[in-house]
């Protein structure tokens, strides 16, 4: 009898991680859900997979190696969040660097095969960011130490803004995976995600801008933005993001060693997004749409907050057959419904 493959999800109780766990739970696999706290992601009661949950503090020496031991595949969705629950990282933030980059380095070391195992290199799927800028050494986004061509490399514009610490850390992690893949030590795939939003499954919370503004509108408060509303974002519904990871898992050998843009493929002005969000809330509450107002940006705002973000998911779709399924307006409606009351959870 062939043993079921062991898939480990790091960050299993997080916003994206909990949805990925729900997708994988429907497969005949051994599923190890690793999170910092002893929580069980929603939906596992009807699981087809053999599910094991582990509460692990990955900052403890040796904890990561123990968490991924024996894994055939690892989905790395551990996120660094600051005290306010945001992803931002500052220069010199050692905790952010460790989770965004150092953990990937430890993962590559932990999964390095030995002749005694006779196992093929483990698959590692890494959640990167669509705002990662081209590699400064090559100007193309190509990992400087491997020469591997990214899935959708393009010449860097002359006016490329400086990368944020978060972007630099994610890019460094991508290079670690590309190097380890080139060396035959693992099968690494980086998925560059845009803004991901949608209903959260317990115990996760979506702290992103879409849900934050939906909560404001549900409370009758104005929706605020730090610009005139013309800044464009590619918004990806969370379940579509989760199925991108399962598609990448199914085609990991084809995707190996490169980074791939994943998104809706449509960059929408945030002013339009927020007005549609206000309308979705109004249709549920029966009141008028709350106003959408421009406010002064806070001191911690960075250049990335005012940068258009576009993705080209076509290469990833051609390689895997994946495509986003939930249109933006429907995704906004589902998000509002879930935040407005318990019955909205049925729309996940």
Image (cartoon, grey):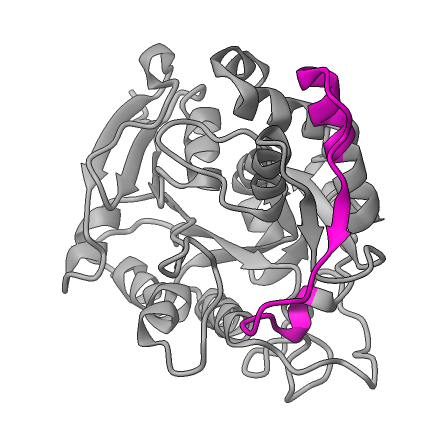
Which image quarter holds the C terminus?
top right
- Find residue 130 and report its image quarter: bottom right
Callout count = 0
Magenta-span inclusion, residue 93: no
Which image quarter holds the N terminus?
top left
Tell me the residue at 59%/60% (across/down).
Answer: 129
Whether residue 330 is visible: no
324 in relation to 84, above or below:
above
Residue 75 placed where, x, y %?
A: 42, 46
- Find residue 55 and report its image quarter: top left
Residue 196 vs residue 212, the one in the foreground: 212
298 in relation to 332, above or below:
below
- Left or right: where 339 falls relative to 10: right
Residue 314 placed where, x, y %?
A: 80, 47
Residue bounds of the magenta highlight: 277-305
Residue 279 placed where, x, y %?
A: 78, 28
Residue 305 vs residue 48, the one in the foreground: 305
Tell me the residue at 29%/22% (across/down).
Answer: 50
Residue at the farthest left position = 61
Magenta-span inclusion, residue 288: yes
Whether residue 131 is visible: yes
Tell me the residue at 28%/51% (across/down).
Answer: 118
Tell me the residue at 51%/76% (across/down).
Answer: 165
Residue 340 vs residue 200, the one in the foreground: 340
Residue 161 vs residue 245, the one in the foreground: 161
Residue 21 placed where, x, y %?
A: 41, 31
């Amino acid at each position: 009898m062939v043993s079921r493959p062991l898939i480990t999800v790091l960050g299993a109780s997080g916003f994206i991680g909990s949805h990925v766990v729900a997708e994988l739970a429907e497969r005949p696999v051994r599923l190890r859900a690793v999170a910092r706290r002893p929580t069980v992601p929603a939906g596992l009661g009807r699981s087809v997979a053999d599910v094991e949950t582990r509460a692990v503090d990955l900052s403890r020496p040796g904890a990561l190696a123990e968490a991924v031991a024996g894994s055939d595949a690892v989905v790395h969705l551990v996120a660094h969040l600051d005290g306010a629950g945001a992803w931002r990282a500052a220069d010199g933030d050692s905790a952010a660097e460790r989770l965004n980059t150092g953990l990937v380095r430890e993962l590559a070391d932990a999964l390095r095969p030995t002749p005694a195992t006779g196992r093929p290199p483990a698959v590692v799927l890494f959640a990167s960011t669509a705002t990662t800028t081209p590699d400064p050494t090559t100007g193309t986004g190509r990992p400087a130490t491997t020469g591997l061509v990214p899935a959708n490399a393009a010449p860097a514009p002359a006016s490329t803004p400086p990368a944020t610490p978060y972007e630099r850390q994610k890019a460094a992690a991508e290079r670690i995976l590309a190097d380890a893949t080139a060396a035959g030590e693992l099968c690494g795939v980086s998925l560059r995600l845009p803004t991901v939003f949608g209903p959260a499954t317990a115990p996760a919370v979506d702290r992103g801008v879409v849900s934050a503004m939906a909560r404001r509108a549900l409370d009758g408060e104005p929706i605020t933005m730090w610009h005139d509303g013309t800044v464009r974002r590619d918004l990806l519904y969370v379940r579509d993001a989760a199925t991108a990871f399962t598609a990448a898992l199914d085609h990991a050998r084809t995707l190996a060693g490169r980074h791939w843009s994943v998104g809706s493929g449509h960059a929408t002005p945030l002013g339009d997004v927020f007005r549609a969000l206000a309308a979705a809330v109004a249709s549920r509450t029966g009141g008028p749409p709350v106003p959408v107002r421009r406010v002064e940006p806070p001191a911690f705002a960075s250049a990335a907050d005012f940068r258009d973000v576009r993705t080209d998911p076509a290469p990833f779709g051609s390689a895997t057959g994946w495509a986003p399924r939930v249109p933006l307006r429907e995704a906004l409606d589902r998000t509002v419904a879930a935040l407005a009351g318990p019955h909205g959870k049925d729309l996940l």
